[in-house]
Image (tube, grey):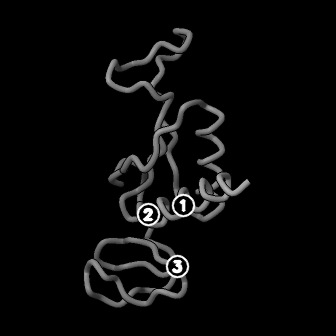
Amino acid sequence: MPYCPECNTEYKETVMHCSECDVDLLPGLVPSQGRGSVDWYVVHSVPNEVSGYILKSVLEDEGIEVFLRSNEIPAYGGLKGTLVKSEWGEILVPTYSVQRALECIKAYIDSLNQN
């Protein structure tokens, strides 16, 4: 999958130029980095654990690195660790995969709405 050497955004095979950075894309995968050195971005909130793992697998099937973060405190029966968030958890991806992840999530949700 081509990616931008400036912002590390992944693009579909048919795209050859990064519109944000105005540079040509490089072939192959974005150079991997350890989880600690990657900037993570929340791309979607999930209402429950099952939904979280479904979306996680959708993104992983597309080759996108994913982190599923729960907002619940372990062993406290669903008690949230924050009063601000009512959702069960969040889907996070590296910033260089945000655009592609949002496209995949939208396509998946659209396919559910067609049924």
Mark 1 or mark 3, which has the lower sequence index?
3
Q: Position of residue 78 (x, y in %)?
A: 53, 15
- Quadrant of the rendered structure where residue 111 is? bottom right
- Quadrant of the rendered structure where residue 10 is? bottom left
Q: Position of residue 9 (x, y in %)?
A: 39, 71
- Looking at the figure, which quarter contains the N terminus? bottom right
| Image mark for residue 97 | 2
Residue drawn at x 34%, y 18% is 83
Amino acid type of the residue that numbered disc 1 sits on in the rendered structure? Ile
Kindly indicate whether the residue at mark 1 contacts the one at mark 2 (C-beta within 8 angstroms).
yes
Kindly indicate whether the residue at mark 3 contacts the one at mark 1 (C-beta within 8 angstroms).
no
From the image, tell me which residue sits under label 1.
64
**Is 6 situated left or right of 47 in this image?**
left
Query: Within 10 Å of the Cα at label 3, are there few (<14), some (14-19), or many (20+) other Cα atoms?
Result: few
Q: Where is residue 59 in the image (x, y as percent from the top left)?
A: 58, 57
Residue drawn at x 37%, y 88% is 17
